[in-house]
Image (spheres, grey):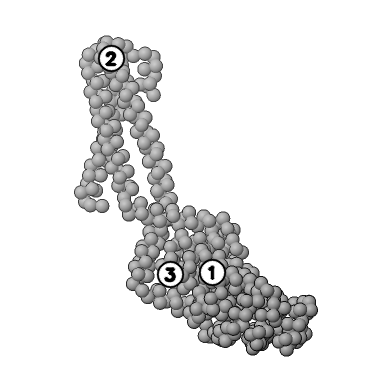
């Protein structure tokens, strides 16, 4: 605030105080003069009193307007807006979890810190935390899961909400802890970076197949590797999901299948008992072996054997997967060593984090978060000020109404009229 504005405000406040004190004195004089209605001097005094009251009320109005403008200065308004925006976003988190106030306050601060680190809007991170809470993640994992989703969104080229939803569903379906979910996300990113598949499609495939793969004791990363292979050869996500599900279900229940299926296994040089034992020992290896045996069949026999095994509906899809068995092997090798994929998500995020555009975004986010912290300090005072300001304007309105009432009395007195008992009562109030 400039020195000139400070000086002006002080002058206005002085004028208001002096004006209101004078108005009070005038009102007392007016009440005393009301008995001398016929005295013109008295009437003149009352008129002058009302004029001074009018000036005082105008001074009060000027100060109120000036103070209102200064109180809603742009900086405070911006900070308050950021605080209110964040408070609204966190209200959704509050609905999803029931924790003591001190723990909730720590979570609020953690989200702001993550926002500054990632450049992601605090409101978006709060939404991710709320979604993670609703999906059943424990309190100690909420912030970490939101950070994982925000990094995954950048690395996967998906929205944060899509990423969070996909990872939440998968981690729940597969019973993955937060570290295991992070490892899985690294695997998905690593697969997509080294194949012709995308993270979005791999996650879509996993949401269709992941639970079935778990039943066969495939790890989440291994199931994703099969999906990446199918997607890399151009099989649409939905088709890849349903086709691979049929492949797994039929082989997992080989001993329950009918005569045609058993004939198909025989054509591959397998029995249901041998297949079941292989799947129990090494599911991924057993599935690769089946695919290799299918791929090795003469072309003239392949479609018939596949139809016996998986039905005509899925024969073509499994034939494509068998033809890409080398791609399957490559994908499985990509996820075989945890050290190879570890930190894949962070590496991709770091590339984005180093860009100029990201630096600019971070700067803006940091300013917004700082404003939210400052605004959060302002909001109680602003609420109190708003309540007080409302009371002030109520009083000012009453003064204006009283001024109009007195102007009417003065006009009647000046015209030789009398004040009624009600007039006398209003003057005394």
Q: Residue at x 70, y 74 (%)?
A: 311
Q: Residue furthest front?
A: 300
Q: Indicate which disc, 3 or 1, sits on the residue closer to the N terminus.
A: 3
Q: Which of these two is toward me, 176 or 419?
A: 176
**Position of 40 relative to 111 (above/below):** above
Rendering coords of residue 59 (x, y %): 26, 35
Looking at the rendering, in which quadrant would you find the C terminus? top left
Residue 413: mark: 2
Residue at numbered disc 1: 145
Can residue 1 be seen here? The reply is yes
If you read the primary sequence from the N terminus, does the residue marked by circle 2 or circle 3 appear first? Answer: 3
Which of these two is toward me, 398 or 155?
Answer: 155
Q: Is residue 144 visible?
A: no
In the figure, is residue 365 to the left or right of 3?
A: right
Separation (CA) of disc 2 from disc 1: 79 Å
Comparing marks 2 and 1, which lies closer to the viewer? 1
Relative placement, left or right, of 199 versus 213 is left
Q: Which residue is mark 3?
A: 118
Closer to the chain start, of discs 2 and 1, is: 1
How many other residues sit within 10 Å of disc 1, few (<14), some (14-19) or many (≥20)?
Answer: many
């Amino acid at each position: 605030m400039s020195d000139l504005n400070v000086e002006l405000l002080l002058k206005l406040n002085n004028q208001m105080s002096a004006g209101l004190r004078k108005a009070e004195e005038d009102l007392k004089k007016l009440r005393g003069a009301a008995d001398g209605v016929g005295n013109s001097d008295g009437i003149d005094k009352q008129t002058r009193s009302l004029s001074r009251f009018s000036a005082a009320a105008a001074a009060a109005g000027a100060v109120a307007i000036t103070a209102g403008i200064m109180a809603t200065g742009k900086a405070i308004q911006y900070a308050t807006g950021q605080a209110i925006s964040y408070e609204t976003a966190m209200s959704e988190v509050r609905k999803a979890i029931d924790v003591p106030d001190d723990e909730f306050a720590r979570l609020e601060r953690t989200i702001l810190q993550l926002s500054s680190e990632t450049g992601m809007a605090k409101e978006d991170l709060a939404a991710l935390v709320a979604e993670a809470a609703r999906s059943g993640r424990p309190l100690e994992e909420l912030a970490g899961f939101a950070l994982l989703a925000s990094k995954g969104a950048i690395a996967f080229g998906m929205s944060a909400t899509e990423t969070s939803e996909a990872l939440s569903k998968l981690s729940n379906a597969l019973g993955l802890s937060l570290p295991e979910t992070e490892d899985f996300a690294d695997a998905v990113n690593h697969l997509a970076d080294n194949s012709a598949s995308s993270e979005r499609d791999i996650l879509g495939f996993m949401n269709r197949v992941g639970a079935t793969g778990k039943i066969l004791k495939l790890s989440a990363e291994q199931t994703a590797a099969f999906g990446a292979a199918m997607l890399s050869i151009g099989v649409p996500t939905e088709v890849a999901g349903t086709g691979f599900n049929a492949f797994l279900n039929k082989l997992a229940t080989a001993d329950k299948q009918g005569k045609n299926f058993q004939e198909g296994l025989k054509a591959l040089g397998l029995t249901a008992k041998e297949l079941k034992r292989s799947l129990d020992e090494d599911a991924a290896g057993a599935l690769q072996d089946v695919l290799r045996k299918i791929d090795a069949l003469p072309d003239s026999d392949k479609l018939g054997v596949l139809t016996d095994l998986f039905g005509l509906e899925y024969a073509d899809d499994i034939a494509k997967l068998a033809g890409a068995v080398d791609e399957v092997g490559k994908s499985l090798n990509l996820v075989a060593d945890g050290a190879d994929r570890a930190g894949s998500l962070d590496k991709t995020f770091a590339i984005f984090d180093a860009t100029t555009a990201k630096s600019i975004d971070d700067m803006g986010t940091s300013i917004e978060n700082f404003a939210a912290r400052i605004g959060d300090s302002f909001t109680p005072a602003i609420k109190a000020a708003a309540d007080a300001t409302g009371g002030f304007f109520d009083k000012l309105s009453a003064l204006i109404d009283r001024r109009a009432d007195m102007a009417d009395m003065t006009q009647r007195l000046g015209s030789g009229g009398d004040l009624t008992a009600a007039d006398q009562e209003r003057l005394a109030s």
